[in-house]
Amino acid sequence: MKFTVTATDKSTNARVGVLDLPHGSIETPRFMPVGTNGTVKAVSQATLRSLGFGLILSNTYHLYLRPGLDVIRKAGGLHRFIDWSGNILTDSGGYQVFSLAPFNKVTKEGVRFRSHIDGSLHEFSPEKVVEIQSVLGSDIMMTLDVCTPPEITYKKAVSALEITTDWAARSLAHLGRLETPAPGSLFGIIQGNFFKDLRKRSAEEIASLDFPGIAIGGLSVGEPKETFEEYLSFTADLMPKSKPRYLMGVGTPEYVFAAVENGIDLFDCVFPTRIARNGAVFTADGLIALKKEAHAESFVPIDADCDCAVCSRYTRAYLRHLFKAKEILGAMLATEHNLHFMHRLVTKIGIAIRSGSFPELKREFLDRYLKQ
């Protein structure tokens, strides 16, 4: 993997770069749609390609449980299994182990958990997670880490940090021992919860392991926006400038601007696609709920400023009808629009950074988007 910074903003830490990956180059900053089970819900791979996405995210935990590694191995890897010619980032599955599994137990060796599907017992070690992602053929792999919620004790945060660092080192060492070299690159993850001394310690320890890329974990997990921005800025300042920075779990316009302003290159979130399936869509004037009665005879596009295929063909009234009639097409069209909106926004941000107008774009966009 190669990462090159091609432009920077003079008044913030925002930057533009090129990330060269096995399945093509990606310009950063870049939003990644989430395809948990090897599919971004309610949208086809062909549509994703037409929207300009060259990097999507899939989930190690879910794919390991279903369809299972044997199926994906026999298919020739995840790219062939899902017919995706672009790049794939797979997370470690750690977050899902802690949030979905009805039982989990963490030790220094790894984590034991029960499947949320059938209750079967499984174990993830940092080495095993690397092996799983190697079988998947991930272009970017993530280390197994210990995810912690807000408001835990300092003692528990220290324990989680120490295990995360140890697992990161073991992951990197095991990657070098694989009989068949993994096609992708492995990123480390910074933890430390909401304690600045622990964030600093984690950032220094992960950076010392010399991963080709580094992610920030444990933010956007329910904390107040002010706390998110404070810890994002603090943590990002501690990260190497020469490597791609990935902020996990961010996908609303205001959080995207905050991420980019702090020098983040990659971010992902289920939010744009999840709300679309429930009838909420992005516009330049903020979110709107298509199911509302106010749109029953609204024969205008979702967003007059949008050039996506959905806005050029369909009206709010028709989309409301689809949702009220529980037609699958409603979720599909809303998802396509939201993904286009996010991709176009991040593309505009890149253009603004190169032209020196990023602060102006941020102010003008958010003044309008948040005015409601």
Image (cartoon, rainbow, N blue to C red):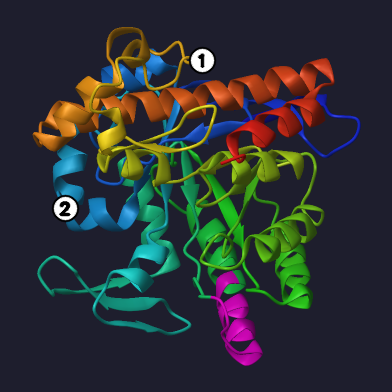
Which x, y percent locates residue 345? Answer: 57, 25
Magenta stretch, residue numbers: 150-164
Quadrant of the image for the N terminus?
A: top right
Dividing the picture into quarters, in which one does residue 195 lie?
bottom right
* In the image: residue 351, left or right of residue 153: right
99 sits left or right of 319 in the view: right
Q: Where does label 2 land, which residue?
A: 66
Marks 1 and 2: which is nearer the front? 1
Task: Specify the label residue 305 is tagged with.
Answer: 1
Circle 2 packing at 10 Å, graded few (<14), some (14-19), many (20+), is few
Query: 67 and 148: which one is in front?
Result: 148
Q: How much space separates mark 1 and mark 2, taking CA atoms?
A: 41 Å
Q: Which one is in front, 63 or 318?
A: 318
Q: Quadrant of the C terminus?
A: top right
* Residue 327 on image: x %, y %: 10, 31
Q: Position of residue 323 (x, y in %)?
A: 17, 34
* Residue at 75% over, 53% down: 236
Let me know if residue 26 appears in the view.
Answer: no
